[in-house]
Amino acid sequence: MTVPGADLLAAWEQTRQALSDAPAVLDTRGAAQRTFADIETEAAELAATALSKFIAGSVVGIQIGNHPAWPAAWLACCRRGLVALPLERTITPQERKAALRVCHAAGLITDTTDDQITTASLAYEPVQWGEHVPILLKLTSGTTAAPRAIRFRSAQVVADCTQICDTMGITERDLNYGVIPVSHSYGFSNLITPLVVRGVPLVMSRDRMPRAVLDGLARTGATVFPGMPVFYQAFCGLPNVPAMPRLRLCLSAGAPLPLPVAQRFRERFGHAIHSFYGSSECGGICYDREAPLEQQGFVGQPMLGVELEPLDAGSSTTRIRVHSAAAGDGYFPEPDAACLGHGQFTPDDLMSETPAGFRIVGRASDLINVAGKKVNPAEVETALLAFAGVREAVAFGRQSTLRNEEVSACVVADAPVSEAELLEFCRRRLSGWQVPKRIFFLTEMPVTERGKISRRALAKRFVTPSAL
């Protein structure tokens, strides 16, 4: 019988033998917290003690934030044949309870106030996985608020790491700076798996203040920074920034990268930001290798080992089907085979193919239905961003008794501007049904820990009076 974590454990064995006493996890001052040998010892101890009470196939949640014990906790689960369920530190107790219930978790790994790892048993029975036993469940809410998980086997996790490292040229000579949550798919795939599979060391940071992150990047000599747009935007506003001579690769994922932010960052820091487009369901999809920073939403060519199949050939915009060895086996507990499985995944994003690569132009689920006419919010946002002084813009649909939905928008402006001026500006650039009925001004866009803006949340916040 094949051990579920065989591919991952084999890769780890090569890594630890080659890099045994080398630093694997560093703190934000550059001091080693774990060598590769330390991780092996810690994993073996966890597997033999705290995790020994769980039978193979059981799901174990891991909610320890960006803790240096993360690699060891995951490897210990693999050794025991357990299924790891990463949980974000910031979810509410109710959200955690729902996730553990949906995934039938038998255990939960957390950390105490003094950073000690503790394990608790839960009441859920082990899952009968069938032929393909996973080693990892990634939580996603998809287009709804209800949690569900994505099943991954060892080979798929290794394939994702291989595609990322080979496409981006990341090796064991690099140093990743881990400030994004490692419990999120982006952080897990770009930080934890490269350490385990390819021996790429990482700085494990819990800092969220932009100044602290920049200082940590400079102090540690990190060479790769997987970031999100919210970080880059904040960096551009900081005075007296430190020199970062070793930093060679800046990545942005998790949310669309505003083109003005990328351009300002390059002017200020001398580094281009490379957009990385991926999904929890299938890992990396596209990567902007050259980073020309000329088109909003441009995400470059497919990752190495990934093929993209347009579903509406001949159309200027289309959904795509991703073919990849990193694609998960399906959702859990409901599989949804039409969307995910058998080495393929169909994202909700609308794509436009250019000679240089692909550009994201919106999401099928975000289209606003105005009296039967579909409005792509990205087109409205492009018009608003063309107005001098508008730094950010998000368009969304609000309920309308006469037209099903009406277009509305939120903007963040760096200069004085009125709603009337923006509406008149939009009327000269958009069709009548695309022009927002209302524009709301914010001092900053609300974002999640993943750096994403929820159109659904904005629509709820600015609900039309008739919908109350």
Image (cartoon, helix red, strand yellow):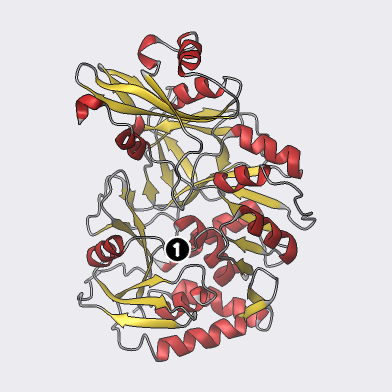
Q: Position of residue 412 (x, y in %)?
A: 52, 31
User: In the rendered view, would you say 369 is above or below 112?
Assistant: above
Which residue occupies 63% across, 67% down? 203
Amino acid type at circle 1 is: Ser
Q: Is residue 211 visible?
A: yes
Number of labels in the image equals 1
Quarter-of-image position of residue 301: top right
Which residue occupies 51% across, 74% down? 71
Out of 257 and 113, give the one closest to the viewer: 113
User: In the rendered view, would you say 464 is above or below 343?
Assistant: above
Which residue occupies 49% across, 77% down? 9
Which residue occupies 69% across, 76% down? 31
Residue to which mark 1 is pinned: 183
Out of 151 and 54, give the one closest to the viewer: 54
Q: Position of residue 441 (x, y in %)?
A: 46, 29
Q: Position of residue 293 (x, y in %)?
A: 65, 34
Give the left or right position of residue 387, taking residue 269 as reference.
left
